[in-house]
Image (tube, rainbow, N blue to C red):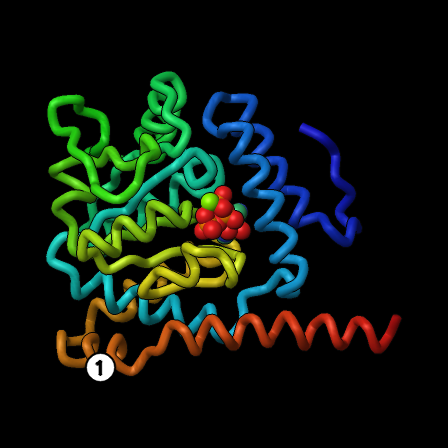
Amino acid sequence: MTLIPKSHPRRKSLLIREKLVNGFDNGLVAKEGLLAQGRGEAFDYLLGEKTNKMAKTAIRVAAAQILLADFPVISVNGNVAALCPKEIVKLAKTVNAKIEVNLFYVNEKRKQNVIKILRKSGAKEILGVDKQSKTTLSGIDSARRIVDKNGIFAADVVLIPLEDGDRTLALRKAGKIVITFDLNPLSRTSQTANVTIVDNVIRSMDLLIDASKKLSKRNQMELKKIVEEFDNKKNIAKSIIEIRNNLLRRARFA
Ligand code: ATP
Ligand code: MG
């Protein structure tokens, strides 16, 4: 572990980066996952490295949407397993969702490592493991079209943090309600999902757990109202404007 001074202005960001690097060293994260993190970091910088109002709104809607689901599933890839495995397990318990391991760059060893960390974090049931229950989503040619027929295939609501655009589109085409965490408001995943949380998953996963706990006391009518009043496209647009405003502020002081 590298020593990052407490006073370092990018300390938090560097600590997150370190989690990814450790994840890579421990066979959880793919090389491409490190690059995806880098792209995310750039947007995080532009967003001011904090959870904004729009992300908080989307988190509340995401919680309502998961609580309304008959069969919610959380999809876990290498980056998510390296960043927040405990939170994934906690969220799954809070909202009664299944956990499915789904790697973009398929590699049996890495999959086993992801399963191991999820188990260590308290997961009892993990889908996407049993070869017998494999099936495919149509509309994508990557190995990620493979899903578990008892998991994502059967789900009505899927939470896909840090997901690729092709797969998000395939899930929407398959009729799923898609929730994502994605720092890039311009990515295809952000633009295609039903509920897009434009924030660092490491900051906002806990907020989603809290919102789910709070909203679990509400009735279905109230939850439906929260979902119906939300406009994802408008909410994403506000994050893009926030980036523009942050840039303008910086340009003025330059
Ligand atoms: P798309 O396929 O949706 O067009 P992409 O090809 O640019 O996007 P991918 O590698 O497919 O990117 O998806 C990873 C996404 O996850 C990126 O948009 C990246 O910004 C985002 N991301 C990376 N790290 C984090 C993080 N810690 N929290 C939230 N989002 C992240
Ligand atoms: Mg992509």
| Name of the residue lying farthest toward the right | 254
- In the rendered structure, the answer to whether residue 166 lies left or right of residue 52 reads left
For residue 115, what is the image quadrant? top left
Expressed as whole percent of the image width and height from the top left, the position of residue 33 reads 52, 35
| Residue 241 on image: x %, y % | 59, 76
Residue 237 screen position, x and y as percent: 50, 75
In percent of the image, x 34 and y 65: which residue is there? 195
- Amino acid found under the numbered disc labelled 1: Lys
Q: Quadrant of residue 141?
A: top left
98 horizontally vs 25: left or right = left
105 or 155: nearer the viewer: 105
Q: Is residue 63 above or below residue 176?
A: below
Q: Above or below — where is 207 with respect to 34?
A: below
Which residue: 38% across, 72% down?
A: 232
Could you tell whether 57 is left or right of 174 in the image?
Answer: right
Say which quarter of the image contains residue 153: top left
What residue sits right under mark 1 in the picture?
Answer: 225
Few, some or many residues within 10 Å of mark 1 (<14, 14–19, 20+): few
Which residue occupies 73% across, 71% down? 247
The answer to whether residue 247 is seen in the rendering is yes
Name the quarter where the N terminus is drawn: top right
Quarter of the image with the C terminus is bottom right
* Helix, strand or loop for disc 1: helix
Residue 71 or residue 122, whichever sits in front:
71
Placement of 38 over or under 242, stated as above or below? above
Residue 248 location, x and y as percent?
75, 76
